Amino acid sequence: MGHGELIRALPELALWAMGRRVRYRVRGTSMEPALSDGSFVLVDPRAFARRAPEPGEVVVARHPFRTDVRLIKRVRERPSEGRVALAGDRADASTDSRDFGAVPVADVVGRVVLRLR
């Protein structure tokens, strides 16, 4: 992380230290090149308390069939009827809404706010 990146990251790191951000580890290559396998992200779990996820945002969501798994995916389209379509950046390496359909907006647990290497 360069000096400028570190300066921009400090507020998010402070919020993480105060327990207002959650850290997740990226597993797999479905979000490359934006997020690499093994990297960490900080997530704002309150990001959607007042608004719905927007297309293009990277979010963490509960897997629709495996309750112990969290997905890190990009919002594909605006939520409709309480559901949101999610997709990995690499379609050939991603299991997402193209496979299991849109997920309930309530299963989106937060927005990725910072990528840590």
Image (cartoon, grey):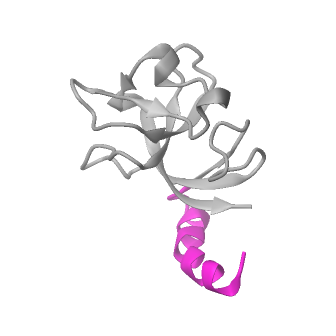
Tell me what residue is drawn at x 62 percent, y 42 percent: 31
Q: Kindly give the residue lying farthest to the right in the view shown.
A: 38
- Asked if the stretch drawn in magenta spans residue 114, the answer is no
| Prevailing SS of the magenta stretch | helix
| Residue 20 screen position, x and y as percent | 50, 59
- Asked if the stretch drawn in magenta spans residue 13, the answer is yes
| Residue 17 screen position, x and y as percent | 61, 66
Quadrant hosting residue 84:
top left
Count the marks: how many? Answer: 0
Is residue 93 rendered to the left or right of residue 38?
Answer: left
| Residue 74 screen position, x and y as percent | 48, 42
Is residue 107 rendered to the left or right of residue 24?
Answer: left
Tell me what residue is drawn at x 53 percent, y 57 percent: 21
Q: Is residue 71 above or below residue 48?
A: above
Query: Which residue is at the front of the view, 60 or 34?
Result: 34
Quadrant hosting residue 29:
top right
Q: Is residue 60 above or below residue 62?
A: below
Query: Which residue is at the front of the view, 93 or 65?
Result: 93
Tell me what residue is drawn at x 70 percent, y 53 percent: 40
Q: Quadrant of the N terminus?
A: bottom right
Q: Quadrant of the C terminus?
A: bottom right
Q: Which residues are magenta?
A: 1-21
| Residue 64 screen position, x and y as percent | 50, 18
Q: Is residue 37 above or below residue 20?
A: above
Quadrant hosting residue 26:
top right
Tell me what residue is drawn at x 39 percent, y 37 percent: 76
Q: Kindly give the residue lying farthest to the left in the view shown.
A: 81
